[in-house]
Image: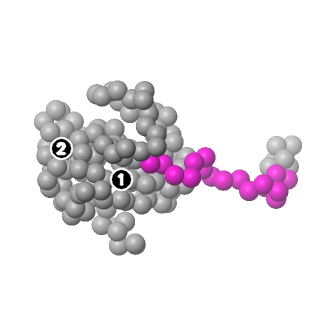
């Protein structure tokens, strides 16, 4: 009961945000202000990154030519789109030197990268990633 009273008292003076971060930035192959130096090629994505997506208000996804070559980026994207569907995460796509239709239709470097992932026995994951990439048209309709 004491904790409920404390919660009520604090809610009138300080708004409680349902997120810890304003923006989650998902990118590959472009110079940015910060990158996680602990991530090594071929390793699984850190659970802390997936948690950061869950605790973010919005996501800025920079889809570059090499984005789909990264399993980490594709895992981030799948999680971002999952959170969008479940919790209404705001997602802003940026198409950096890549045609949005190539991303959606998985042509060019996106088709090549996904085919390579499938050959390396990531079939189930690749299906999730393909599904996430095909959801871009619904994002773009609202812009």
Taking the spot 16% from the left edge, 32% from the top edge, the residue there is 120
Q: Nearer the viewer, residue 6 or 34?
A: 34
Q: Percent from the top left, x then y, of residue 54?
A: 51, 46
Taking the spot 34% from the left edge, 26% from the top edge, the residue there is 40
Q: Is residue 72 left or right of residue 8?
A: left
Mark 1: give few (<14), some (14-19) or many (20+) Cα within 10 Å: some
Q: Which of the 4 image quarters holds residue 57?
A: bottom right
Q: Percent from the top left, x then y, of residue 132?
A: 31, 53
Image: magenta residue range: 9-25
Q: Upstream in the sequence, badge 2 or badge 1? A: 1
Taking the spot 24% from the left edge, 45% from the top edge, the residue there is 66
Q: Is residue 55 left or right of residue 85?
A: right
- Say if residue 131 shows up in the picture: no
Image quarter hosting the C terminus: bottom left
Residue where numbered disc 1 is placed: 62
* Camera-nearest label, 2 or 1: 1
Residue 113 marker: 2
Q: CA distance from mark 2 to mark 1?
A: 16 Å
- Does the magenta run of residues contain 24? yes
Q: Percent from the top left, x then y, of residue 43?
A: 33, 27
Q: Percent from the top left, x then y, of residue 112?
A: 13, 46
Image quarter hosting the N terminus: top right
Secondary structure state at the residue bearing disc 1? strand
Q: Which of the 4 image quarters holds residue 29?
A: top left
């Amino acid at each position: 009961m004491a904790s409920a009273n404390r919660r009520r008292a604090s809610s009138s003076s300080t708004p409680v945000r349902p997120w810890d971060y304003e923006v989650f930035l998902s990118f590959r192959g472009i110079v940015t202000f910060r990158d996680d130096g602990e991530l090594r090629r071929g390793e699984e994505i850190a659970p802390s990154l997936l948690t950061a997506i869950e605790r973010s208000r919005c996501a800025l996804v920079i889809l570059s030519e090499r984005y789909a070559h990264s399993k980490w980026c594709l895992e981030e994207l799948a999680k971002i789109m999952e959170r969008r569907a479940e919790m209404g995460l705001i997602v802003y796509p940026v198409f950096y030197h890549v045609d949005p239709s190539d991303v959606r239709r998985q042509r060019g470097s996106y088709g090549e990268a996904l085919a390579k992932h499938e050959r390396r026995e990531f079939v189930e994951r690749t299906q999730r990633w393909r599904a996430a990439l095909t959801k871009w048209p619904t994002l773009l309709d609202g812009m």
